[in-house]
Amino acid sequence: MSNTNNECVSETIGDYVLVRLRGEVDLSWSQQVRRAILDALGRTGKVGVELSQVSYIDSSGIAALVEGFQSARGKGQKFGLVATSQAVMAVLQLARLDRVFPLYPDLDSARSA
Amino acid sequence: MNAAAPMAAAGAHERRALGFLAELSQNLALSLDLNDTLRLAVTRIADFMQVEAASLFLIDRTSGLLECRNCAGPVDIAGLKLAVGQGVVGRCVAENATQIVRDAQRDARVNANVDAETGFVTRSILCAPLSTARGVIGALEVINRRDGGLFDEADAEILHLIAAPAALAIYNAQLAEGLIEQQRIKRELALARRIQKSLLPKRRRADFPLIGVNLPAHETSGDFYDYFDLPDGRIAFFIGDVSGKGLDAAFLMVRVASLLRAAGKHAPAPGAWLEEVNAELCETLQDGRFVCVALGQYERTAHRVTLASAGFPPALLHDGAEFREWPADGPPLGIVAGIGYGEQVIDLGARALYLFSDGATDVRSAGPDRLGSAGLRELIARHSGLAPEPRLRALLGDLKKLSLVDDTTMLLLQEPTGKMAHTLLDLTFPARADEMRRVRAALRGALDGEDVAPELRDRLVLAVDEACTNIIRHAYCGGEGETIALHLAREQDMLVFELCDSAPAVDPARLKPRDLAECRPGGLGLPFIDALMDAWELEPAADGKGNVLRMHKRIRVEDG
């Protein structure tokens, strides 16, 4: 991927894994995001995706989040979105998914949920 | 002045001096009221140096004279003024050098007048300049050692050291004052500018034939324009340029604009309209001020303009190829009372009439030369393919890139041609997902250029992105070497997005947006496009090789 502003980093905090995303999440690397989320769910039962640094997300990015949510739900795991940016929120609302995902303003509230 | 002895070898005298210096510096640095602090400082300096009198002189920035601001001692000389170079103090400042006058009675430098008036006997004087980055701002003077001795080099050195923190504190205070004053002026000018801006007419709907733009070169503008509807359905308009600059030109601008509007309400013939306002201005304008004005009325059904101009730059009529000039009918308003103004009738048709203040032709291009009328015509011709509003915007954009010397105001009178669409973006790119970032950025830029609100802009970008990725994934099925052509055009307030590919024809019937109520990962692209665009249609390309997806979105033009 030649766009150096995009980033997907998984951070382990105790029994919680936070997948931090940055940049514009689109088809060119949403597969990477998908794998990161599913990997995290494979390692632990509490996963969050940090979205404050995401300035753009398309349907494939949303799809990765949805897949994570459904996978977690199926296995009784916890999955939520942390500090969603304005841009991400707008798209979630458009896709009518803003009431579906658990949304947390910050890591602490996500972990204590 | 020799350097002071190193700290290690410093005697009691030096240590005392350093202690005093430290305390003085601290007091000055922490001072909230500098005047007060300086008053106390002068007293303490007198005590520390064991002198009978001490005084602080500062250069008054308006008069350029040295004025005694604070003093301590038996004679109050506060307010005493000296010219730079006059007396010991004046000389100290002029030479930026400490002055030692050992025997005042016999020294030619001393001004004996003060003693004569006050009865004080000046025996010995020491004066050190207050030096700052901006030069000498004043001086510190001490008179008569209390022990009766004469001032020596050691005393001079100490005074020199004491002067430094005082100079710094005063300098800082002056800088701060200057800054506050600057801010105040800035705020007032900004307010004046806002008021002026609020007096400009509101933008009208896209089918209104008049568009005006105003680019001030400074904080306030001497240019103005206005248009309003007349009871008989015609549109009255005027554009003007007040001579001079600054706040009073701005005030005059407001006044003239009001006069013109009031006089224009009863729809006088343009010549008479100018005469009415001219009469009023000749009576009351002073200081050689005058106003250049062009005005008239426009009849929409007949596409007819009646125009009159008082000293305004010639109106420019353009039919897309030829230019024709309409010079002024008389001198600017406010100069010759009772003069008659004629008027011109122009059958506009589909042509464009440009009225612009001389700021437009005075714009400097790369060199020192003015853009001139020829240069302006060239810019107009360059954009003649655009619809009126984008054309005026493009023209303004060009002028902004050059350097504005004066306020630039333009009025464009032209019937909007509904069919005239113009291209905002024309981009062909490889059909690959990693190209989309660049495409999105280009699209954002094009939409920003049309003043699309940020939330709408982002939604439109999303819709186009989805459409492109659909083409990449489903039409091309991820094949290599194919391209997508994105074309964005604007017709009035309608945006038309067109995506062309060269993939096998897609059966439109197979494209059905899914129900968003079901929570599934995929298939969100089409529902997004559906939700975000007013309408879309997919059809085979004209030459049968590929598909064309067209999406429409009406963007609202703000009314009022």
Image: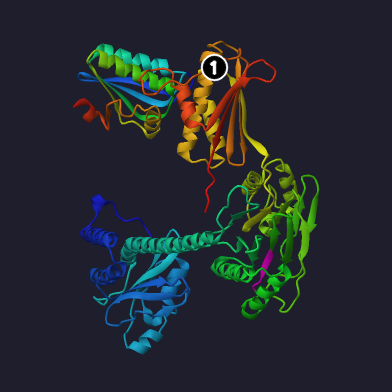
Q: Is residue A14 left or right of residue B298?
A: left
Q: Residue at x 34, y 81 (%)?
A: B77
| Residue B195, horizontal then vertical, whole percent | 50, 62
Residue B334 appears in the figure: no
Magenta-highlighted stretch: main secondary structure? Answer: strand
Picture layout, residue B116 above or below residue B157? below
Q: What residue range appears in magenta?
A: B289-295
Q: Secondary structure at mark 1?
A: helix
- The colouring scheme, among rainbow, by chain, secondary structure or one colour, is rainbow
Q: Is residue B340 left or right of residue A24?
A: right
Task: Determine crowd level at label 1: few under 14, some 14-19, many 20+ residues with C-alpha closer than 10 A.
Answer: few
Q: Is residue B440 left or right of residue B322?
A: left
Quarter of the image that includes the N terminus of chain B: bottom left
Quadrant of the image occupied by residue B285: bottom right
Q: Residue at x 73, y 63 (%)?
A: B307
Quadrant of the image occupied by residue B34: bottom left
| Residue B84, horizontal then vertical, whole percent | 47, 73
Chain label for disc 1? B
Kind of residue indicated by mark 1: Ala
Picture layout, residue B233 above or below residue B511? below
Q: Is residue B508 left or right of residue B210?
A: left
Q: Nearer the viewer, residue B523 or B323?
A: B523
Identify the residue at the far left of this view. A112
Q: Is residue B541 magenta?
A: no
Quadrant of the image occupied by residue B357: bottom right
Residue holding disc 1: B509
Q: Nearer the viewer, residue B303 or B381?
A: B303
> How many callouts does the rendering have?
1
Q: Is residue B294 magenta?
A: yes
Picture layout, residue A57 above or below residue B103? above
| Residue B533, horizontal then vertical, whole percent | 51, 31
Q: Nearer the viewer, residue B52 or B11?
A: B52
